[in-house]
Amino acid sequence: DIMPPPAAPLASESPASSDYTQVKSTTFSGTQIVTSVIDKKTGLEWQYKDGNTPRAWDDAVSYCSGLSLGSGDLTDWRLPEVFELQSIVKYGASSPAINTTEFASSVNDASYWSASSYASHSVSAWFVDFSDGSISADFKAKIPASNYVRCVRGGSNHYPLLMDNGDGTVTDLATGLMWQQTDDNTARALSDANTHCTSLSLAGKNDWRLPNIKELASIVDYRQPPGGSNPVIDARVFPGAIASVYWSASSYASDPTNTWSVTFSSGHVVRAPSTNTLYVRCVR
């Protein structure tokens, strides 16, 4: 098996407080205050308190690039990419879907801008809704502005680093996950999707499973312009990929009759009734 780079593991589906370290600074009066939060798994450092103001996208970019925060007044803050922002979603919670002990929010249930533009519609950008963890797109100059901002610093692998193993599998070197290269073009009920993956024998491996929502979203390539039958995935290593909706194994926290899914025709992360029939790509 191929070992992943140690600096870029995938964030937990529902991060625990132990996944984070709060960074404190000392004020002129000698009081210590939390200024940022380090994610131990991704290495990203996050603004502890969000920007407290809904902003247009250009203003959000400027706000982060102009931010001076933390020990030594760090100035290399930026607006996070959509996959980075999703990494701090806590899918086992809702309203808000984030660790409220580790992160301070100006409002609950707010949506937050990412730096990722919508590939086929540059006047729009992706955002993450922290009421539940859904991912959608909005006009950058929407009036009135309704999306908030939480800045980040540090580097990460911005897109899947995929390698065709030549045996019907693909390894993402950014996460270490091994994927079924070609799904069987069959829509299944959720229970059948789980059984399909756990029963799969491929490339001499028998420990296949249905991916959780962060794992499934990790192979979305937001650089790919959506439209028609073109899926937002690297079709060179995933030949025959379908521009449709795929199951994850993650239940919707506030309504277990729904399950998280990824729409590979666009990149949206949405809930779907668990009675639906969706497509399946297994992982290990």
Image: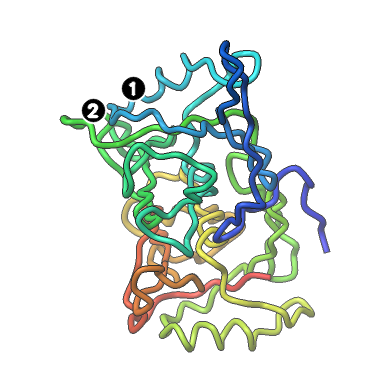
Is residue 11 toward the left or the right of residue 217 in the image?
right
Q: Foreground residue, 267 or 53?
A: 53
Q: Within 10 angstroms of label 1, few (less than 14), some, or many (20 or more) residues? A: few
In the rendered image, which quarter contains the C terminus?
bottom right
Identity of the amino acid at label 1? Asp
Task: Name the residue rendered at 38%, 53% in the picture.
Answer: 96
Is residue 257 toward the left or the right of residue 98 in the image?
left
Image quadrant assignment for residue 123: top left
Q: Foreground residue, 46 or 231?
A: 46
Query: Residue 226's x, y, as percent?
Result: 36, 49
Residue, disc 1: 58
Image: 40 above or below 141: below
Query: Residue 218's x, y, as percent?
Result: 56, 54
State yes or no: discs 2 and 1 in contact (Cβ < 8 Å). Answer: yes
Task: Name the residue rendered at 60%, 56% in the picture.
Answer: 16
Query: Residue 231's x, y, as percent?
Result: 43, 57
In the rendered image, which quarter contains the N terminus?
bottom right
Q: Within 10 angstroms of label 2, few (less than 14), some, or many (20 or more) residues? A: some
Residue, disc 2: 141
Q: Name the disc covering residue 208, or none.
A: none
Task: Give the spatial CA distance, label 2 vs label 1.
Answer: 8 Å
The count of marks equals: 2
Q: Foreground residue, 84 or 185?
A: 84
